[in-house]
Image (cartoon, grey):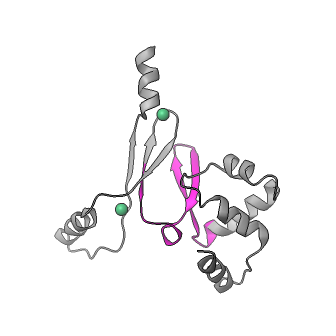
Amino acid sequence: MIDLLAQTLREAGHSLTKPRMTVFGALQAPKPKTMNQLVTSVSDIINRASVYRAVALFEELGIITRIQHGWKYRLELSDAFTPHHHHLTCNKCHRIISFDEPDRFDEIVSGIAASHGFVLQNHGLEVYGLCPECQTKKAAT
Ligand SMILES: [Zn+2]
Ligand SMILES: [Zn+2]
């Protein structure tokens, strides 16, 4: 993965610096991070400004993607750098849970595309609801 990162940066005329490597490493965690969580997780290695600069560059180069939910967003590595997956987002606490898609899901999607004369290239799917914790809270009040 670091090789692919270095290559992606090099092709765009950038080098693999320590802040870039650190931010990339922090985003390899299984859960998408908010900007604050990301800054906090690397705060003993690099400062906030370096994190912001690395994130801006990574977004520009398609290395990371933003999962937008209302006015909030979380960051994660793009499909090229992480196994393909989808998200369940809680409408109340904004937590995001990643899940692998079921077997043959791609077949279903290409079937839909084909029925409209499309050749499938990629797809996205976001699922929204209430997480177990928020359901409990609701029941308690
Ligand atoms: Zn929730
Ligand atoms: Zn998928």
Residue at left 43%, top 21%?
A: 138
Give the percent coordinates (x, y) of residue 27. 62, 59
* Quadrant occupied by the C terminus: top left
Relative to 84, 119 lies left or right: left
Residue at left 40%, top 18%?
A: 139
Give the percent coordinates (x, y) of residue 40. 74, 48
Relative to 78, 34 lies left or right: right
Let me know if residue 61 is in the magenta part. yes
- Mark count: 0
* Quadrant occupied by the N terminus: bottom right
Residue range highlighted in magenta = 59-87
Residue at left 46%, top 38%?
A: 90
Relative to 7, 100 lies left or right: left
Please, is residue 121 above or below residue 135 in the view? below
Q: Quadrant of ligand 2?
A: bottom left
Let me know if residue 101 is in the magenta part. no
Question: Would residue 55 be visible to someone looking at this image?
Answer: no
Quadrant of the rendered image containing residue 129: top left
Give the percent coordinates (x, y) of residue 59. 62, 66
Residue at left 63%, top 48%?
A: 34
Give the percent coordinates (x, y) of residue 17. 77, 74
Question: Would residue 60 be visible to someone looking at this image?
Answer: yes
Of all residues, the one furthest to the left in this rendering is 115
